Image: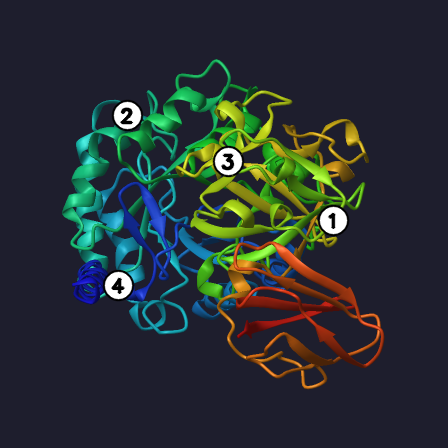
Amino acid sequence: MKTIKIYLTTVVFSLIIWFNGTSQGFYISGNKLMDANGKEFIIKGINVPLAWFVSDVNNNIANIKKNTGANCLRIVVTTSTSDNDWQTCVRNCINNQMIPMVELHDVTGSTDANRLNDMAKFWANKKSFLTSSDISKYILINIANEWGDWNMANSNQAAWRDAYKTAISTIRNAGINTTLVIDAPDWGQDLRNAETIRNYAKSLQDYDPKHNLLFSVHMYCEWANGGGSSVSSGLPAIKNAGIPIIVGEFGWQHDNGSGGVCDIPESTIISTCQSNGIGWLAWSWKGNGGSVTYLDLSNDWAGTSLTSWGNTVVWGSNGTKTAVTCSVFGGSSSGSGIVSGATYSIIARHSGKVLDVNGAYTSDGTNVQQWTNYNANNQKWIITDVGGGYYRVSPVHVTSKALDVEGASTADGANIIIWTYGGGSNQQWQFVNLGNGYYQIKARNSGKCLDVSGASTADGANVIQWPCNSNSTNQQWALTKVSSRAEATTDIADFSNENVIIYPNPSNGLINISAKANDILFIYDLNGKIVFSKILDSDKNTIKLDIAKGMYIVKLTSGNDFYHTKLIIK
C-alpha cells in the first residue's frame, strides 16, 4: 500500500502540473508564486529601463547581478523596442541567474480597454519565443505597466476587471501558460489598501483557465507616510485574503503631483514584505529624469557606485544581497551553495568556535551556545530546505529538534534554543551569503541574525538574535560540510580514496589501515558515540579494537578531507 500511495501522489501531482500548464514554468499555488521545480520563489529585484537605454542595460546585466545579488529584473519594454533588444536582455538575465519579468510601458495610466488588449496581442504574437524550452520556465510576463487611472480605482473597478479578462483570453488563447503579472489601477497604486485587487483579483484568477495570475501594486504617494493606504497592515491583508501579490515598484520618495514630494516608507515596505513572504522590485536602476532623478539606485550603469537609495535596496536589512536565487537555475534552491539535507559545522568567524547544543542534551528548551569544536554530533547540523529560501537546522544528536528563537520572540537579544520542529517561522532560517566565505543566518519570524552575545570568544558564550550588521564578525558563520552518523550509515562502500584501505571487513576486531601518518581515526557506534580514536603513527597500522560485536562507522580525517565507511565486528 505504501508504494501505491507514493505512486498515486506522484500521478496526482503530475496531473496538477498538467492542468495548470506549469510544465512551462511559473505557476500560482494559493497565494504563492512557485517555480517550475515546485519551489516557492520570492522576488527581490530591480526595475531596469531597457526601453530607453538598451546598450547601457544589456551590457551591464552581469554587473547588476554581481553588485546587487538581485534574483529578478523587471525589464521595461515598449512596443517599439526591437525583439532582438528585449529578447537579448531576457537571455542575459537567464545567463546570470536572474528571473526576467518583461513589462510593456506603452499604456501607463490609460483607461482604453482596446489599448490594453493591444498589449496582450503583442505578447500573443511573441508566442514562439515565450514558449521555447530555453525561455518558458524562466520568464514572467507583466502584461502592461499601470493600466488604469485614479478614477477607475475610485469608482469603476469593474472596468479594470473586465478589460483584463479580455487581455487574459488573448494571451491564453495563443498558448502562453506562464504566470501573468497584473498591475493595479491608479497608475499601479490602487486606493484604500488595494481595494480593487482585493475586490476583483479572485474573480480574475478564477477566469484565467490556468489560474496563474500574480498581482502587483506600486507603492508611491498613495502608500506614503500620511497617505491613504497602510503598508504594514494593508499589504499583509492582501496576501492573507489568499491573493498572490508583489510590490512591482516603489521608491523612497516621489513627486506628489503638486510641486512637492511625498515620503514613502521604504524600509517598512521591505520589512513587511520580508515578514510576509512578499516579493518586491525597487524603482529603478538608473536613467530617471526630470524631477525624479533621486530614484536612481546607481550612479553608474555597472553598479560600482550606488546611491543612498541604492545602498538601502542592496545592502539594507533584507535587501537584494539576501535574495534567494530561483531553483530553476540548478544546484541548491537557495543558490547559496548549501546542499539541502547535508550536515555542516557552523563556525563563528570572530572566535573560530562552533554552534553547539549545551551538554548534548535533547530536551526542548536546551540552550544553544558556541564551543570549541570536538567533532561531536551536538556540534553538527543538518540543514534542510523548507521552501521560499528558508531552512530547518537540526542537530545531528537529536534530529527531531531544530534551531529555534525562544517563544517566537522578535526582540533584540531573544535566546536561541532547540525545540521539537513544528515548522514555525521562528524555526526557519535564511542563509545570506556575504560573498566572503561567510553567511549571516537570519530568523524568518524576526528578520534578525544569529549572534554570539557580546562578541565573546569564550566557550559557552550564549547565542542570541540581534539586528543584522554585515560588518559584525560575531554574526558571520562559515559552513563546513562534515560527516555524521546520519550520513555515514548510508554509505556501505569502502573508503572513497584509493590511498585509504581498511581490511578485513567484516573483522574479528583486528584491522589493518593503510593511510597517512598523522591522520586521525574515529570509530562511532550507531548512536553517534565515539568508541575509539587514534592518531595514526605511520602509513600502515594494525589496530586491535576491544569493542563489542556489531556495526560501526569508521571516519578517517586527513587534513581538510575525510573518508568514512561501515565496519562490522563479528
* 2 and 3 marks in contact (CB < 8 Å): no
Judge left or right: residue 466 versus residue 168.
Answer: right
User: Which quadrant does the N terminus fall into?
Assistant: bottom left
Q: Residue at x 73, y 74 (%)?
A: 543
Where is residue 520 drawn, in percent x and y?
76, 66
Would you place residue 26 above or below residue 246 in this image?
A: below
* Disc 3 target residue: 444
Circle 2 residues within 10 Å: few <14, some 14–19, many ≥20: some
Separation of residues labelled 2 and 3 (CA atoms): 28 Å
Q: How far apart in space, not on screen, are marks 1 and 2 (Cα)?
A: 55 Å
* Label 3 environment density (alpha carbons within 10 Å; few <14, some 14–19, many ≥20): many
Looking at the image, is mark 1 or mark 2 earlier in the sequence? 2
Residue at image point 54% right, 52% down: 382
Tell me the SS state at disc 2. helix
Q: Secondary structure at mark 1?
A: loop
Residue 195 disc label: 2
Q: Are marks 1 and 2 in contact (CB under 8 Å)?
A: no
Q: Say if mark 4 contacts mark 2, CB within 8 Å.
A: no
Along the viewing direction, whichever of 489 and 545 lies nearer the viewer:
545
